[in-house]
């Protein structure tokens, strides 16, 4: 199976529901991250071995490959990562790939049935923990579903779900 490790999401600007410096440290569980009700591999809190060392918790995401529930390395959050991202420049994530396969991670900022998507950030297998930045300005995002979707600026003001996923294309 493919695996990625997610430690913290850090927000780099001011917003209504998401705050400067907000992060998930996973010391108290998965902190509202899930992979859907039918996934056989939900995100799991690992209490040790994060980027800050032996006592640092992190969130493990696993994908089995193929198609269907649990096939992709992915997680969603409908709680603390919703709100207004207007004026934000980036989201930072500490990642490591614990499988033998390199991954390409994207963030999807969802509004209703539409998403705006970051460029894929390559994460090399076996390279250890790395802090990666995802540009989230309107100029850096792509509207993934043109029909009936708000423009990117409107979407950034009304994010209802943050989705992290291996998605090379």
Image: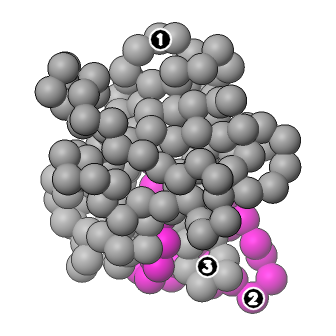
Label 1 to label 2: alpha-carbon separation = 41 Å
- Closer to us: mark 2 or mark 3? 2
The residue under label 3 is: 151
Residue drawn at x 37%, y 21% is: 129
Percent x, y of residue 5: 44, 33
- Closer to us: mark 1 or mark 2? 1
Label 1 vs 2, first from the N-terminus? 1
Residue drawn at x 18%, y 20% is: 54
Percent x, y of residue 4: 52, 33
Q: Is residue 10 left or right of residue 70?
A: left
Instruction: Indicate whether residue 141 is drawn in magenta.
Output: yes
The answer to whether mark 2 and mark 3 are in CB contact below 8 A is no
- Closer to us: mark 3 or mark 1? 1
**Secondary structure of the magenta portion, mostly?**
loop
Percent x, y of residue 114: 66, 77
Task: Report the span colored magenta.
Answer: 135-162
The residue under label 2 is: 148
Label 3 to label 1: alpha-carbon separation = 37 Å
Q: Is residue 9 left or right of residue 160?
A: left
The residue under label 1 is: 127
The answer to whether mark 3 and mark 1 are in CB contact below 8 A is no
Label 3 vs 1, first from the N-terminus? 1
In the image shown, does 114 or 163 lie closer to the viewer? 163
Residue furthest top in the image? 126
Label 2 to label 3: alpha-carbon separation = 9 Å
Residue drawn at x 60%, y 69% is: 37
- Could you tell me which quadrant the N terminus lies in? top right
Residue furthest right in the image? 67
Mark 1 packing: few (<14 Cα in 10 Å), some, or many (20+)? few
User: In the picture shown, does residue 74 fall above or below 120?
Assistant: below
**Residue 144 visible here:** yes
- Could you tell me which quadrant the C terminus lies in? top right
């Amino acid at each position: 199976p493919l695996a990625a490790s997610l430690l913290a999401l850090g927000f780099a600007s001011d917003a209504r529901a998401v705050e400067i410096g907000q992060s998930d440290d996973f010391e108290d569980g998965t902190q509202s991250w899930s992979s859907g009700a039918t996934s056989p591999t939900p995100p799991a809190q690992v209490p040790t071995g994060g980027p800050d060392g032996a006592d640092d918790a992190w969130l493990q995401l696993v994908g089995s490959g193929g198609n269907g529930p649990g096939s992709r390395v992915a997680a969603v959050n409908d709680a603390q990562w919703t709100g207004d991202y207007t004026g934000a420049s980036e989201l930072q994530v500490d990642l490591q790939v614990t499988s033998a396969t390199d991954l390409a991670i994207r963030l999807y900022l969802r509004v209703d049935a539409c998403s705006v998507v970051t460029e894929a950030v390559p994460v090399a297998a076996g390279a250890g923990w790395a802090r990666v930045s995802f540009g989230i300005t309107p100029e850096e995002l792509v509207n993934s579903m043109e029909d009936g979707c708000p423009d990117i600026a409107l979407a950034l003001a009304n994010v209802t779900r943050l989705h992290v996923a291996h998605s090379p294309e």
